[in-house]
Amino acid sequence: MEMVRVVSWSKIENIATIVINNPPVNVLNKEVIEQLCLVADEIESDCNVKVVIVTGAGEKAFVAGGDIKGFPDWIGKGVEMAKQKSLWLQEALNKIECLPQPTIAAINGVALGGGCELAMCCDIRIAEEKVEIGLPEIKLGLFPGAGGTQRLSRLIGKARAKEMIFTGEPLNAEAAKEIGLINHVVSNGEGLEEAKKLAERICNHSSPSLYFAKRSIDEGYEQSLEKGLLTEAENFGRVFQTRDVQEGINAFIQKRMPNFLDQ
């Protein structure tokens, strides 16, 4: 039987767009999780992709959450089984977070539970005005298990993360922007287009410099300042071995626009 595509991706020039299309509200069920892993692997191996956009199909939801109808099968089966389910959910989202390219979440509808957790895996988040984003799992007698307790506190601080998770109440787009969960809020229907515009601006730069910058930020954030500065210096050393740094510096000296080769 042919696999039904619920996660697809396409590439226009150097921008890859991942679309989750699992009607009616793009829940993260088994098929979405498995295909998200496959798509992430395919994009990571494509050396021509410079920026990745993640969005949901339709106008209702980015991703409305996990597949709650499947949760009863996880109850009372022992700690290890539920733990492995959590790790399985985390794996797909980790793959998005670990993509070497800059990633942008174009949040075009509700992003609750797993949807919020997926958005947090991206480097930059753009939300439409109508968006509600949050982690409501506590209302079901559980808590986020696909990275939510870890990524949210790192993004907005421990106290704010605890309030969001303990109450389960979602935020609107503007409130999420105020606390740093969202980078930009745009008019309804314009999320993907704004993400593409931002992606195009990023694509003007050299792939190696983007890669080493992202790597320095992500690795250094988990380290002490002393170790993080060493990580930055090591990647700074690596970027100075690229052809693009020579082109960029020469272009600056010669007062012209650089012609990066992504090498």
Image (spheres, helix red, strand yellow):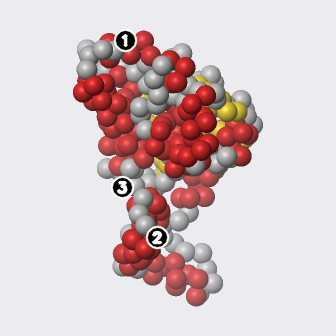
What is the secondary structure assignment of the residue under circle 2?
helix
Question: Residue at horizontal 52%, vertical 24%?
Answer: 138
Which residue, given by chain and number where applicable, does mark 3 sit on?
47
Label 2 near label 3: C-beta < 8 Å? no
Q: Earlier in the sequence, mark 2 or mark 1?
A: 1
Question: Residue at horizontal 52%, vertical 83%?
Answer: 249
Question: Residue at horizontal 43%, vertical 38%?
Answer: 147
User: Quick check: can you spot residue 243?
Assistant: no
What is the secondary structure assignment of the residue under circle 3?
loop
In this view of the protein, which residue sits in the foreground, 203 or 107? Answer: 107
Q: Position of residue 122 (x, y in %)?
A: 50, 46
**In which quadrant of the rendered view does residue 134 lie?**
top right
Which residue, given by chain and number where applicable, does mark 2 sit on?
225
What is the total number of numbered labels drawn onto the structure image? 3
In this view of the protein, which residue sits in the foreground, 21 or 13? Answer: 21
Does residue 258 lie above or below 212 as drawn? below
Quick check: 87 left or right of 49?
left
For marks 1 and 3, give the CA distance.
42 Å
For marks 2 and 1, give the CA distance.
44 Å
Q: Which mark is residue 72?
A: 1
Amino acid type indicated by mark 1: Pro
Amino acid type indicated by mark 2: Leu
Q: Earlier in the sequence, mark 1 or mark 3?
A: 3
